[in-house]
Image: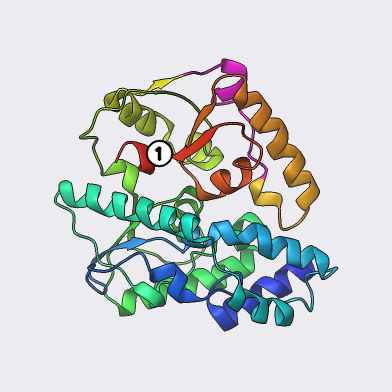
Amino acid sequence: MESLRSFLKQSLDKYGMPFPVDKRVCSGWARDLPHGGETIIFTSCMYQIEPVVPTLSKFSSMAGALTGALKGLSSFAKLVKPPKEEMERAYTILNNIVNALRRRGINPGYLYEDEPYSGALLLESGLLEDFADHARKVASMLKERGVKRVITVDPHTHNALTRYGEFIPFDVEVVNYLQLVDVDRKIDGEFTIHDSCLYSRFLNLRDRYRELMSKSGIKLNEDFLVTGRETSTCCGGPIALINRDLSESIAEKRAQDLNRLSNKLLVMCPICYVTLSPHFKGEVKDLAEVIL
């Protein structure tokens, strides 16, 4: 764990992200959003960079240990970008979300390459003192920019930001896009669903996105033991940096269970998408690709 902590802290100090990342990849989706403002969309670069993470984690394993791997990853990361189709997909999702917000009269700003990372990986790794230190830096930056409300787009960022108040004084409102958007199009299709563990069990958004799906006309193929609130299982993605083999094993089993319900799968988390896609036999789509 100490090697993971050292790796994350070095990368956050140098790049502002948990991995060496070209921030232009993070901000490339936005073209006409105001720079900053009292209300901003907060991506934490999750959708944009997640397709690269499996490659970076493989490199870390090849290096034998995370400690000392940062120097190698630094140069490697300059060459590794998400495949064009995955980057375009991520950018489409984010623009779909912004356009849906605009249709509701919400015009968020964006911090572009200055957008900080939420610290989710520190929190989820149990590095709570480091998470508190990181949260303090992010909160100070948001205060300097006059930000009063952030709109999150993924469960891990939403969870991290909503927990800042447990560790530091934090008076910025945190709201998720699913709480703000509505559905204006009808979808004729049947899917099964892999719920985000965070959205479903901890952030009280499970009923909200099911409401949006139902309104769109989507029919969900579910089974209590596979997609139930208490009985569904993790995609395996969050543990990949610590134990890649275990992560792959969990993902393969989860995809097999979901495939018994449908060959069309809906997810609402970039980690779930990247983790399950290689194992699911069929089409995997993010909710924001389908209903917005």
Q: Nearer the viewer, residue 104 or 27?
A: 27
Residue 224 lies in magenta, yes or no? yes
Residue visible at 60% across and 26% down in the picture: 258
- Looking at the image, which residue sits at the far left? 105
**Residue 137 to residue 254: above or below:** below
Q: How dense is the environment of label 1, judged by Cα within 10 Å: few (below 14), some, or many (20 and up)? A: some
Instruction: Give residue 278's quadrant in the image.
Output: top right
Tell me which residue sits at (30%, 77%) in the image: 145
Residue 262 at least partly seen: yes
Q: Pick the residue in front: 130 or 1.
A: 1
15 relative position to 59: left or right: left
Residue identifier under label 1: 287
Looking at the picture, does residue 230 appear above or below residue 32?
A: above
Residue 100 placement (x, y as % from top left)? 24, 47
Count of number-bearing discs: 1
Residue 187 placement (x, y as % from top left): 30, 27
What residue is drawn where x is 72% and y is 31%?
253
Q: Quadrant of residue 119?
A: bottom right
Q: Would residue 2 be counted in the magenta stretch?
A: no
Q: Main secondary structure of the magenta part?
A: loop
Q: Is residue 13 left or right of residue 58?
A: left
Q: Is residue 140 above or below residue 26?
A: below
Q: Residue at x 23, y 37 (%)?
A: 182
Magenta region = 221-236
Q: Amino acid at mark 1?
A: Leu
Badge 1 marks a residue whose secondary structure is: helix
* Residue 231 is at least partly visible in this image: no
Q: Quadrant of residue 170?
A: bottom left
For the C terminus, the quadrant is: top left
